[in-house]
Amino acid sequence: MESWLLEYGSLCLLVAGFLYGVNFPCPLGVLLMAAGSLARQGLIAWPALLLACPLGILLGEQPWFFLGRRLARRAPERLAARFRERGPSLLLTGRFIPGVPATVVPLAGMTGVSWKRFFAWDLASALLYTVTYAVCGNLLSQWLSLSQIVTLAVFLLIGIQVLAYSKRTPS
């Protein structure tokens, strides 16, 4: 992973962000933690990291928003009402919960959220996600090697996913 990040840097982060945005299973959090660690060493530029990944996420999620807009008649009313109640701020916090962006992004389109409002919340969410994981990797690199950071990130993300899926309630 380190060699890919060192050689392709922002392109790697752009593609990974795009894959994450189109809901392809991608360990973006792990990649961002590794990139944050490399940024601490001066091997990756912070501006490239903070631009490439959110741009990839935004590019990947826009089609889902417009698909949701096209399928607006098919939104379950109970789900749409809950979304309207909480608003697109779910985009901001939901990004950290596995599976939530895959449902919230099209739902924003289904419930009639304006594209400008969606884009603003989605941009804020993508930036927050990128900064959070990159800064964690950056801070951890003071005490851990890159391979230890990646191992820790993998186990933490697996734990978060197991916890999120065990808390799900059937509808």
Image (cartoon, grey):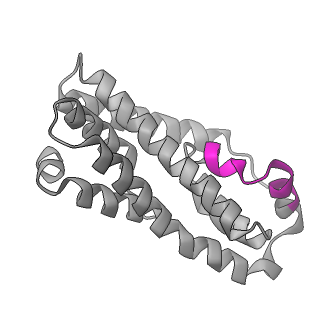
Task: Find residue 168 and report its horizontal and vertical position in percent.
Answer: 68, 45
Quarter where residue 44 is shown = top left
Is residue 146 or residue 117 the one in the foreground? 117
93 relative to 77 in the view: left or right: left
Note whether 133 is above or below 117 in the view shown: above
Task: Find residue 34 and report its horizontal and vertical position in percent.
Answer: 26, 38
36 relative to 81 in the view: left or right: left
What is the span of residues highlighted in magenta in the rendered image? 81-93
Note whether 142 is above or below 136 in the view shown: above
Quarter where residue 25 is shown = bottom left
Is residue 112 or residue 83 the one in the foreground? 112
Tell me what residue is drawn at x 80 percent, y 68 percent: 111
Tell me what residue is drawn at x 56 percent, y 48 percent: 125
Q: Can you say which quadrant of the picture contains the C terminus?
A: bottom right
Whether the magenta-drawn stretch holds residue 89 is answered as: yes
Tell me what residue is drawn at x 55 percent, y 76 percent: 63
Task: Find residue 133 and report its horizontal and vertical position in percent.
Answer: 40, 37
Q: Majority secondary structure of the magenta segment?
A: helix
Is residue 76 or residue 137 the one in the foreground? 137
Note whether 159 is above or below 8 in the view shown: above
